[in-house]
Amino acid sequence: MPPLLPGTATLGVLGGGQLGRMFVHAAQAMGYRCIVLDPDAISPAGAVAEKHIQADYLDHLGLAQLARDCDAITTEFENVPALALETLAGMRVVAPAAAAVAVCQDRAVEKAHFESAGVPCAPHAVITNDIELAAVDPALLPGILKTSRMGYDGKGQVRVKTAAELVQAWNDLKRVPCVLEQMLPLKAELSVLVARGADGQVVTYPVQQNLHRGGILAVTEVPAPDVPAEVATLAIASARQVAQALAYVGVLCIEFFWLDDGRLVVNEMAPRPHNSGHWTMNGASVSQFELQVRALAGLPLPEPRQHSASVMLNLLGDLWFTAEGGPTPPAWDRVLALPGTHLHLYGKAEARHGRKMGHLNITADTPEAAHAVALQAAALLGLPTDF
């Protein structure tokens, strides 16, 4: 298929969240029109797109309208029904494909894919019935029981130490299909962003080091401060293997556990741009969202170049409240007085505790300088400075 040239095509997005919003901004900057399909009447992406189709993701009329008005369509979150992508693919170019997204929607299938791609993951067991529950190897305990589907940001996960706790946790999770992962001693959590075109071209960003709090990404640093070259090389090679084995088209994030004993195991993947890649908006020659646009439109994918050391701070709705619970705006004027700070808010109408409201990128000439400013910004915002 010939590329969809800027200024001549309309791109569609399933999902109206902040990732869709940043995709739309990147596409519009390149001259594309954008249409968002999302059931919410007020959504971050729908607010900035040229058109918002308010419809459920499986609404036949909504999908038909999206296909009629767009030249190619992507998704901004992994839990969009694969059937919606399949339906659209019968009418328009869709990337990533439904089959690739479906792999990411089920942890058991995802782990099988990692193994088939030759990339090691944590020891685990799939639990779908009482027989499989009773057969769990005790060596997997202590572990983390995760629902196979619909879990993200720490949701649908329970830490278990004993067989009795495992049984109770599975019952608490309504006995849905789950994966039990052995709890491993972590040195750090890492991620790699991959972009792959329909022609098989693959490019990657440098390895990103991540800190999570309460199951939600809090801080990303690039270059990864603690990661030796051989570990970074292995992470990037493994991420490319996973993307190639999926015949993936678009931007894909692969998350890794770097263990105390030096091993690298894959944790999970997200078939979309990722929080840990938000630094690319200010610290790289091309952002993850522009690469998503390029892959969807069939344009060349330039090898990203990191031009600035970067730290990303995730901004949750908690920052909009005082310790007593009253509403208060964060001190953006003081934060933005710091050198190399770049604020990205997502246009959400209401701040709520735990809700992702935006992110702050800090760029500098050296990792040490970026880290120092990030600590200052965190202190001004009342965020922990444990990084």
Image (tube, rainbow, N blue to C red):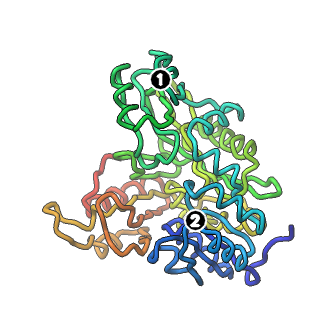
Q: Nearer the viewer, residue 377 or 256?
A: 256
Location of the N terminus (image quadrant): bottom right
Amino acid under label 2?
Tyr
User: Residue at position x 58%, y 31% from top?
Assistant: 121
In percent of width and height, residue 104 lies at 60, 46
Amino acid under label 1?
Asp
Question: Alpha-carbon neighbours of circle 1 within 10 Å: few (<14), some, or many (≥20)?
Answer: few
In percent of width and height, residue 76 lies at 57, 62
Report the disc number at residue 192.
Answer: none
In percent of width and height, residue 9 lies at 74, 80
Question: Alpha-carbon neighbours of circle 2 within 10 Å: few (<14), some, or many (≥20)?
Answer: some
Q: Nearer the viewer, residue 188 or 79?
A: 79
Going by the image, does 372 lie left or right of 108?
Answer: left
Question: Foreground mark, 2 or 1?
Answer: 1
In percent of width and height, residue 359 lies at 42, 64
User: Residue at position x 51%, y 20% from top?
Assistant: 131
Residue tagged 1: 130
Relative to 384, residue 61 above or below: below
Report the disc number at residue 57.
Answer: 2
The answer to whether marks 2 and 1 mark residues whose Cβ atoms lie closer than 8 Å is no
Dividing the picture into quadrants, the one containing residue 126 is top right
First in residue order: circle 2 vs circle 1: 2
Relative to 10, residue 330 above or below: above
Relative to 149, residue 305 above or below: below
Specify the farthest residue to the right. 1
> Label 2's element?
loop
User: Residue at position x 37%, y 58% from top?
Assistant: 374
Cα distance between the residues tagged 2 and 1: 34 Å
User: Residue at position x 64%, y 51% from top?
Assistant: 101
